[in-house]
Image (cartoon, helix red, strand yellow):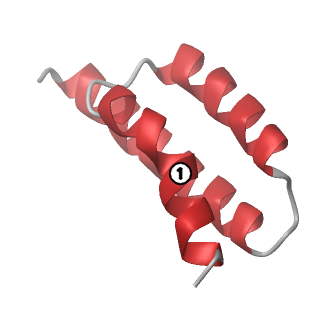
Amino acid sequence: MTKEEFHNEKMYQATMSIARKMLNQGVITEEEYGEVEAVFLKKYRPVLGRIFSDISVDFIAAQSDV
């Protein structure tokens, strides 16, 4: 992983962490979360973030059902 890829990964993960907190607190909807995720996947093009992006909303939804 290059320094630029690492930087982009950090930025994506930090941004999505904030978005997940907002989703969990009810500040944004799952649809809005998906929109945020799409924008930042396009902006940062994370290497690892793409692997986890498909499961993140399902995981969050499962946590809120507990």
Residue 34: % across, % down: 70, 35
Residue at figure coordinates x 64%, y 24% from the top left: 38
Residue 20: % across, % down: 62, 60
Determine whether 49 is above or below 25 in the image: above
Determine whether 56 is above or below 51 in the image: below
Read off the residue under disc 1. 58
Between 61 and 2, the one lying in front of the other is 61
Element carrying mark 1:
helix
Mark 1: few/some/many CA within 10 Å (<14, 14-19, 20+):
few
Determine whether 32 is above or below 1 in the image: below
Quarter of the figure that contains the C terminus: bottom right
In the rendered structure, the answer to whether residue 3 lies left or right of residue 66 reads left
Residue at figure coordinates x 27%, y 23% from the top left: 5
Between 64 and 38, the one lying in front of the other is 64
In the rendered structure, the answer to whether residue 35 lies left or right of residue 38 reads right
Between 39 and 5, the one lying in front of the other is 39
Residue 40: image quadrant is top right
In the rendered structure, the answer to whether residue 44 lies left or right of residue 3 reads right
Residue farthest to the bottom, as pictured: 66
Residue 37: % across, % down: 63, 33
Three-letter code for the amino acid on which mark 1 is drawn: Asp
Residue 45: % across, % down: 43, 17
In the rendered structure, the answer to whether residue 4 lies left or right of residue 38 reads left
Quarter of the figure that contains the N terminus: top left
Residue at figure coordinates x 86%, y 56% from the top left: 28
Residue at figure coordinates x 31%, y 31% from the top left: 51
